[in-house]
Image (tube, grey):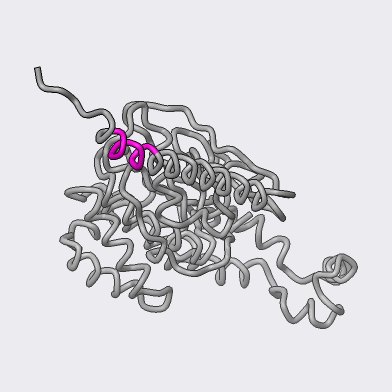
């Protein structure tokens, strides 16, 4: 049997043990410092938790208005998340639509001395003269002005979107495109193109170019609009009302608000999984990805890929609506 020279072995092993002990000590100290730094950063802050019901195939419902800048912000931030997670998620875009009783609205906007006296008292106008200049001289004058802003179901009722008729039209077209899509990425690319290159002044022609670039047939979208617009708007209005959604954007992940209620405010931060985010990060691709990934029973491997925040436009946190 070959003899082992323990003395020589000890000379070799001892430095290794010392190095390992030093490394373990350094790692422990580093972790301690990180923990202390995190504690210091969170001192005086309220930490909200994003808690969501898990499922095999999470559902993400996004409610926007097609020309709300904050809605466009989250659509653009979600695009890399959609590209990453794809069909692992049930993506469901929706639009915030309202019904309008034009006669009722116009009754409050027709001039009478008593009405202007009331409005001045409430601070809506500085004086009676400015009130009279802004209100309509008659009910018919108001109705004539209001009708082009809505998609009418009868002479005094219709559907509207916050930023006007052009936005309402685009809401419908984007829903029609959703029905025609080959995959979710195709639709999201179309919407991102409209967000970037179109506006309320040119969208009635601009959208066609973006549709073609994304692989859609504009003629099919037009046919859908012509035959299905009122049905689409009725369904979207009903869903917005049932979900009590009035602000764009509103995001639900497995029916849980994201961010959760109370997540905005001075010194409030949000915990998503093991990470903490400030309100300025709520609409970053990485934050949105982590939030969606929290809803999986078993996270797909794609959840491990980190996304850049550079895809999100630099807008302050806000919304359209109330």
Q: Confirm whether residue 237 shows in the render.
A: no
* Position of residue 165 measured from the top left corner of the image (x, y, whole percent): 46, 66
User: In the image shown, does 298 or 88 lie closer to the viewer?
Assistant: 298
Q: Quadrant of residue 17?
A: top left
* Position of residue 117 measured from the top left corner of the image (x, y, whole percent): 89, 70
Asked if the magenta segment contains residue 256, the reply would be no
Asked if the magenta segment contains residue 15, the reply would be yes
Which residue does the image show at 36% across and 26% down from the upper left?
A: 297
Instruction: Give the quadrant of the N terminus.
Output: top left
Which residue does the image show at 69% across and 74% down from the upper left?
A: 136
Which residue does the image show at 33% across and 64% down from the upper left?
A: 192
Q: Quadrant of residue 219?
A: bottom left
Q: Is residue 221 above or below residue 42?
A: below
* Position of residue 228 measured from the top left corner of the image (x, y, whole percent): 31, 49
User: In the image shown, does 125 or 141 lie closer to the viewer?
Assistant: 125
Q: Confirm whether residue 9 shows in the render.
A: yes
Identity of the residue furthest to the left in this view:
1
The magenta stretch is: 10-17
**Could you tell whether 8 is left or right of 162 in the image?**
left
User: In the image shown, does 220 or 279 lie closer to the viewer?
Assistant: 279
Q: Could you tell me what secondary structure mostly forms the magenta stretch?
A: helix
Which residue does the image show at 42% across and 64% down from the upper left?
A: 312
Q: Is residue 162 above or below residue 126?
A: above
Q: Is residue 147 above or below residue 270?
A: below
* Position of residue 66 measured from the top left corner of the image (x, y, whole percent): 42, 61
């Amino acid at each position: 049997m070959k003899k082992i020279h323990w003395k020589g072995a000890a000379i070799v092993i001892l430095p290794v043990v010392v190095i390992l002990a030093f490394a373990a000590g350094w790692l422990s100290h580093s972790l301690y410092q990180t923990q202390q730094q995190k504690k210091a950063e969170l001192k005086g802050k309220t930490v909200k938790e994003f808690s969501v019901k898990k499922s095999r195939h999470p559902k993400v419902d996004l409610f926007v208005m097609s020309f709300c800048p904050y809605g466009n912000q989250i659509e653009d931030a979600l695009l890399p998340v959609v590209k990453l997670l794809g069909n692992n998620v049930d993506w469901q875009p929706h639009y915030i639509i309202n019904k309008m009783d034009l006669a009722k609205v116009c009754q409050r906007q027709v001039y009478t001395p008593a009405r202007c006296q009331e409005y001045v008292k409430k601070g809506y106008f500085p004086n009676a003269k400015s009130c009279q200049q802004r209100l309509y001289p008659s009910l018919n004058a108001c109705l004539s002005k209001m009708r082009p802003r809505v998609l009418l179901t009868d002479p005094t009722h219709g559907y509207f979107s916050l930023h006007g008729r052009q936005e309402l039209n685009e809401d419908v077209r984007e829903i029609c495109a959703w029905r025609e899509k080959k995959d979710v990425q195709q639709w999201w690319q179309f919407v991102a193109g409209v967000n970037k290159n179109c506006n309320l002044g040119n969208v009635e022609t601009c959208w066609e170019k973006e549709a073609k670039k994304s692989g859609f047939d504009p003629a099919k979208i037009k046919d859908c609009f012509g035959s299905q617009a009122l049905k689409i708007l009725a369904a979207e209005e009903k869903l917005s009302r049932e979900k009590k959604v009035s602000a764009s954007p509103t995001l639900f992940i497995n029916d849980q608000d994201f961010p959760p209620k109370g997540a905005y405010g001075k010194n409030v931060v949000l915990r998503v999984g093991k990470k903490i985010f400030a309100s300025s990060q709520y609409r970053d691709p990485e934050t949105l990805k982590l939030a969606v990934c929290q809803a999986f029973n078993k996270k797909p491997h794609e959840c491990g890929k980190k996304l850049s925040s550079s895809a999100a436009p630099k807008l302050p946190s806000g919304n359209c609506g109330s």
